[in-house]
Image (spheres, helix red, strand yellow):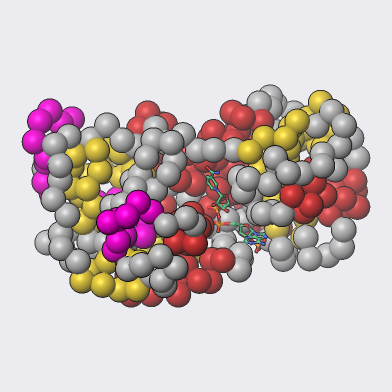
């Protein structure tokens, strides 16, 4: 099968021809129609080398497609089921069997769910990591209606979902992005949008929100200093959450609790998100659609930021055998 794979520690992801994976007991094999790109895909390539013997490893975690083979033993899926999900460990770590490949094998009890009627597989593939992270971030910052959430990096995959889910709970979202994204973020429910390229965020925030921010979700800052600068807008007693592990080392203002977020993928949460997307309550903006061979360039581009919604990668067009 064709796949984007990494052949050795530190090597670039490249298009490769690999054997089709065989499902082990308790697994399903999915014929992937779409994968979606997450920063974790290149972060995993950069990260510590996987266990010896795990090369070549196929990049990617999010997918949608159809079950085409069932491993031995009990299984809640059947051949032909339309499914989507996030491959990898239930603790959020990527597995050896990635989704930028024509077939992926995943445990039937992992974060995999049926694609409901009314949801296309392209949108379903864009949903798992970004949607689940957004839902769990909203739980972690524990805001109720009429409180204010500052989202830094709001125009990317997680940010677009988080803005909508927060808005649906009557949380006031201040979206911080690089560039003028007022129209796009406003259409997703942001109450105000700040352009981080135009001056000091703290000043812009005081203007947009004079009473202070109840919580920060920083989806962009990897450096504790940058994270702390955004957290300086949070009122005492508030929460400052990082998705990039920046909270632990940051000097936060007195009374502000730092949280390093960690996704806990769950099939139940996938069902809830898919129902919302099928009903049109949750919109998953897809910015770019690419053929598989273009995925390495897209990964490289994503490192620099600038994502506007999701990038999806086509493995098989739905309905074509
Ligand atoms: N810890 C976890 O379990 C977990 C779970 C999900 C996601 N994450 C992490 O959360 C982050 C956001 O995820 P995502 O899926 O929303 O990513 P994404 O779709 O690539 O969006 C990231 C957004 O951040 C903005 N950004 C600002 N400064 C940036 C910078 N220096 N570098 C990169 N982007 C920058 C980008 O827009 P502008 O360039 O216009 O500002 C972009 O819209 C990623 O690092 C991801 O790995 C972690």
Which residue is painted at 17% across and 34% down in the image? 26
Could you say where residue 125 lies in the image, as x and y percent from the top left? 36, 51
Task: Say whether residue 73 is magenta.
Answer: yes
Image: 308 above or below 227:
below
Task: Say whether residue 288 is magenta.
Answer: no
Ligand 1's quadrant? bottom right
Which residue is painted at 57% across and 61% down in the image? 308
> Left of 171 or right of it: where is 272?
left
Which residue is painted at 70% across and 58% down in the image? 177
> Left of 55 or right of it: where is 246?
right
- Of residues 72 and 83, the one nearer the viewer is 72
Could you say where residue 197 lies in the image, as x and y percent from the top left? 78, 65
- Of residues 66 and 186, the one nearer the viewer is 66
> Left of 108 or right of it: where is 123?
right
Q: Is residue 205 in sight in this rendering?
A: yes
Q: Would you say the magenta stretch is mainly helix, strand or loop?
A: loop
Which residue is painted at 61% across and 64% down in the image? 305
Could you say where residue 222 lies in the image, as x and y percent from the top left? 67, 54
Magenta-highlighted residues? 50-78
Image: 25 above or below 296:
above
Could you say where residue 314 lies in the image, as x and y percent from the top left? 31, 65
> On the image, which quarter does residue 142 sit in?
top right
């Amino acid at each position: 099968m064709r796949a984007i794979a990494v052949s050795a520690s530190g090597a670039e992801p490249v298009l490769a021809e690999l054997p089709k994976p065989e499902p082990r007991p308790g697994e399903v094999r999915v014929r992937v129609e779409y994968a979606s790109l997450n920063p974790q895909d290149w972060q995993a390539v950069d990260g510590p080398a996987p266990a010896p013997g795990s090369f070549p490893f196929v990049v990617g975690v999010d997918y949608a497609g159809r079950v085409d083979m069932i491993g031995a033993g009990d299984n809640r899926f059947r051949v032909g089921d339309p499914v989507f999900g996030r491959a990898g460990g239930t603790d959020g770590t990527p597995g050896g069997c990635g989704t930028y490949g024509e077939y992926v094998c995943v445990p039937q009890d992992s974060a995999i769910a049926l694609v409901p009627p009314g949801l296309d597989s392209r949108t379903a593939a864009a949903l798992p990591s970004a949607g689940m992270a957004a839902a769990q971030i909203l739980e972690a910052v524990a805001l109720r209606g009429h409180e204010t959430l500052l989202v830094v990096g709001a125009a990317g995959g997680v940010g677009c979902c988080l803005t909508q889910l927060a808005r649906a709970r009557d949380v006031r979202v201040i979206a911080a992005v690089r560039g003028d994204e007022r129209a796009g973020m406003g259409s997703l429910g942001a109450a105000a949008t700040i352009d981080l390229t135009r001056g000091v965020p703290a000043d812009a925030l005081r203007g947009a929100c004079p009473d202070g921010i109840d919580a920060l979700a920083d989806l962009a800052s990897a450096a504790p200093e940058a994270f702390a600068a955004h957290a300086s807008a949070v009122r005492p007693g508030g929460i400052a959450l990082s998705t990039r592990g920046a909270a632990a080392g940051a000097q936060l203002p007195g009374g502000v609790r730092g949280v390093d977020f960690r996704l806990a993928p769950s099939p139940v949460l996938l069902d809830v998100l898919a129902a919302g997307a099928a009903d049109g309550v949750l919109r998953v903006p897809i910015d770019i659609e690419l053929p598989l061979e273009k995925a390495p360039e897209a990964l490289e581009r994503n490192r620099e930021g600038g994502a506007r919604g999701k990038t999806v990668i086509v493995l098989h067009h739905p309905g074509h055998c």
